[in-house]
Image (cartoon, grey):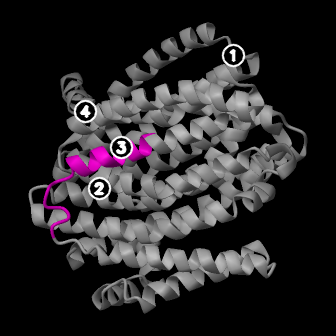
Amino acid sequence: MSIEVAKSVTKNAAVLMGSQAITWTMSFVLMLFLPRYLGSANYGYLYLANSIIGIFIVFIDFGGRYSIAKEISRAPAQAASIVVNAIGIRFYFWLLSIFVLIIFIFVAEYPPIVNYLLLLFAIGMLWEGTRKVLWSFYQGTEQMRYPSLGSISEQIFITFFAVSLLLLGAGVLVIGIVYTLGTFINFFIHAKYARKLITPLPKYQYSESVKLIKKGIPYFLWSIFGIIYYRVDAIMLSFLTPASVVGWYGAAYRFFDVLMFIPSIFSIAVFPVLSRLWKSKDTLAATTNKSIDFIIIAGIPVTIGLYYFARNITQLFYGIEGYAPSVLILQIFSIGILLVYIDMILGTAILASDKQRQWSIVALFAVIINVGLNYLAIPFTQNVYHNGGIGSAVATIITEFFVMVCALFLIPKNTFENGKIGIPIKAISSGIIMAISIKLMNLLLFPWILQGIIASIIYVASLLLLKTLEPAELEFFKNYISFKNLKQVILPSKSKQS
């Protein structure tokens, strides 16, 4: 990975990491209150409604997260036209989504509270579709500080008002209203800064928007199959198990989903860079290879920590009395963390290499496999363990392994030619040392949070002692990722903005 590429990736990753540090904290605060005050059944309803709406939002976005960002990164001069045409066509997608959602509500026969939540969130889909186009514009132009500000504002608003209202006795529908208002605030901030950057605004051209949609079809297929694969478990659980089981599963999955911020940040930061490098095969391979090395190093301690501290985490955020069944689900998810981390980087490289059609086929088969496994595993684990979420979690891990195998076949052949197997081996060795240290501290009755802190320090020390990273890489991180540099990146001066 060249120093220029590294700086570009690190700049965007730093902005996103700064944003994530705040939103992550807010998410944890919210998790301390939502499951406890709503109860497993109502929390399950909220999780179910969010999962269903997530599928419709992906339809409205129609692959824009990848196709729009790629088009803008390769042709910045056309950014204004791309954004206007993309937003225009998504209004029609929103109307179609509302129509389909109403039909789904009548067919599904969910409890009234779920239907109210679905209709409420459906209103927010209008501005969510526009916000996602603007988000892709910022990603394509590598200006992630603006959407980061929107995400921070949304999460702070939701956390403050949701927690306050929960303490006053508010129900799940009121929380749904808070969620919807939060997404509007996020959209408003996206639009405010975009208006300053996209000038003048060109006229909407239907023919051009159709061209954009055609280009986005492979990305849409991947996205829609992907979101169905990730969200179908909640829908199937809602039909095959009681609402409380959906709540147990949703609690574990929510925490698992929060931990996806590491590969998500890296993928968002590296995608426009890889898209620019798609003709430079050697540089593309080197950047992808190094990205995988870094994500493995980051993923191993997360996997170990989540597995060993699953019960403590559940007790802290949800309360073990109402969510004890979530512990085993969380431990199963911990096994798949490293798989998901690697899959996200491989998928980003595949999409940047213009292999979106092949990747969408993989996603289709992943949906088929996941639905089939859920259909078999949910009733079995519900009957045997009285927790269908266990079967759904196992189905998720098996499907992720299938996706990784397919990704390794699709990735450019020269990706790993100059790779160093020693880096993953050293990271795994450091992880083993970390796991042993946790076991020993557990025997000595150390508090679990202290165990996590000490074990993390031991992991980093082991990486350094084993010389996992090259001296040049360490020097780069030392010099570039300093407080002064990060402050300039995340909070640029007015002169730079102008």
Residue 457 is labelled as none
Q: Position of residue 486 (x, y in %)?
A: 45, 78
Most frequent secondary structure within the magenta stretch: helix
- The answer to whether marks 1 and 2 mark residues whose Cβ atoms lie closer than 8 Å is no
With 417 as the anchor, is 175 left or right in this view? right
First along the sequence among labels 4 and 1: 1
Q: Earlier in the sequence, mark 2 or mark 3?
A: 2
- Structural distance between the alpha carbons of marks 1 and 3: 32 Å
Q: Which residue is mark 2?
A: 271
* Quadrant assignment, res 305: bottom right
**The image quarter in which residue 247 lies:** top right
Label 4: which residue? 218
User: Which label lies toward us, 4 or 3?
Assistant: 3
Residue where numbered disc 3 is placed: 403
**Residue type (three-letter) at the residue carrying disc 3:** Val
The CA span between labels 4 and 1 is 32 Å
| Residue furthest right as drawn | 168
Closest to the camera, between mark 1 and mark 3, is 3
Q: Is residue 72 above or below residue 436?
A: above
Q: In which quarter of the view is residue 25 placed?
A: bottom right
- The residue pinned by badge 1 equals 110
User: Secondary structure under badge 1?
Assistant: loop
Q: Please give the count of numbered marks on the rendered protein.
A: 4
